[in-house]
Image (cartoon, helix red, strand yellow):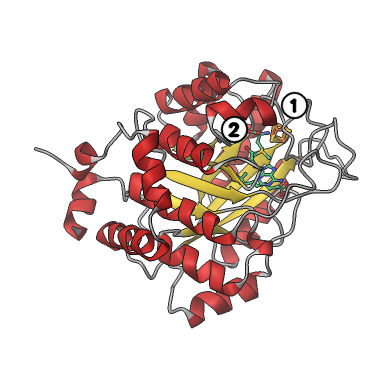
Amino acid sequence: MNTPQDALRHDWTVQETQALLEQPFNDLLFQAHTVHRRHFDPNRIQLATLLSIKTGACPEDCKYCPQSTRYETGLQQEDLVELERVVDAARQAQRAGATRFCMGAAWRSPKNRDMAQLGAMVKGVKALGMETCMTLGMLTPEQSDQLADAGLDYYNHNLDTSPEYYGEIITTRTYQDRLDTLANVREAGIKVCCGGIVGMGESRRDRAELLVQLANLPQHPESVPINLLVRVQGTPLADTPDLDQFEFIRTIAVARILMPLSYVRLSAGREDMNEEQHALAYFAGANSIFCGAKLLTTPLPETDKDLMLLNRLGIDTENLQPEHHDAVQVQDRL
Ligand code: SAM
Ligand code: DTB
Ligand code: SF4
């Protein structure tokens, strides 16, 4: 029997994706919103919260990142935090309405000696009844299996940009390294959260290529974070010119069209977006946001402000069905 999963495409070309991006804005939004409401309740979004479990002093040279040891960003560094603090933060996030708790570490990759503590964090947060996500850098197959055994639901590892532009942004690991980690995570049975950053000076073609890379993975990522570059003083990208706000919305819309069953998450950069931009992003197909005091190191809009806007838009924040990738459930809603 054919399921909607089988109908998902993995053969997008850059040319047709760029053509989608270049449509008249209203045509693109209409198309994206039509896809969105075919598969999701358009008036519900998922709230996720992030905690930095190891901050700064990262050896990598990602030119956007305030946590790289190579740039003077004035960031206070912190070693891997205690289990108790992680569980307390998750409990607090849950009280504020978050259903997913993401833990991020400024590592190139975790050390094997850290794996037991990371596993304990996953178990501690899951015991609260929340979904867990981690982003720790590159993972080996063994490390992926260890996190899967601890019960990790999602692993975030971004492709960040197009293969062509990638070398302008990061030199300390390759695009293939990233694809290998994504494959290791999938193989271990962990769900994949994978997206990128726009506004780093890339071209529209680069944005199309990033989206094609994501959609043509063997399986679409269950979550696709679209980050707008947060320009942090001290990083090489601090003075990157503004991206046209409608290009950001176009990117969300095309992510929705290419990956119709995935959660598209409005991630970094929301501080710089006004209410109208948020509303357009939700219309274009974004159905998840990070909320709370901050992302990993940079601020987020106040949660009350986020909730007030969602309320004014008639969008509720009940937990979306995490098992939405189950073909039967999706079919029920078609
Ligand atoms: N160190 C791990 C890694 O790089 O995979 C995990 C943490 S890293 C901070 C997670 C992601 O945050 C990066 O892949 C990047 O997409 C995003 N990010 C980091 N700094 C950002 C910034 N200034 N603006 C937007 N996104 C950013
Ligand atoms: C993702 O794609 N965006 C989040 C999450 N995954 C880990 C992180 C954004 C970080 C923005 C810069 C900071 O706060 O340090
Ligand atoms: Fe390190 Fe991750 Fe920042 Fe790159 S994005 S410098 S790997 S923390």
Q: Residues within 10 Å of mark 2 (few under 14, many from 20)?
A: some
* Residue 70 figure quarter: top right
Mark 1 is on which residue type?
Glu
**Labelled pair 2, 1 in contact (Cβ < 8 Å):** no
Q: Which mark is residue 60?
A: 1
- Lower position in the chain sequence, tag 2 or tag 1: 1
Task: Identify which residue is drawn at 53% across, 37% down.
Answer: 206
Residue at disc 1, CB closer than 8 Å to ligand 3: yes
Check the picture and name the quadrant holding the N terminus.
Answer: top left
* Callout 2: SS: helix
* Residue 306 figure quarter: bottom right
In the depicted structure, whether residue 56 falls above or below residue 144: below
Outermost residue on the bottom side: it is: 312
Task: Identify which residue is drawn at 50% across, 24% down.
Answer: 179
In the depicted structure, whether residue 139 falls above or below residue 308: above
Mark 2 is on which residue type?
Gly
The residue under label 2 is 119
Task: Identify which residue is drawn at 41% across, 23% down.
Answer: 187
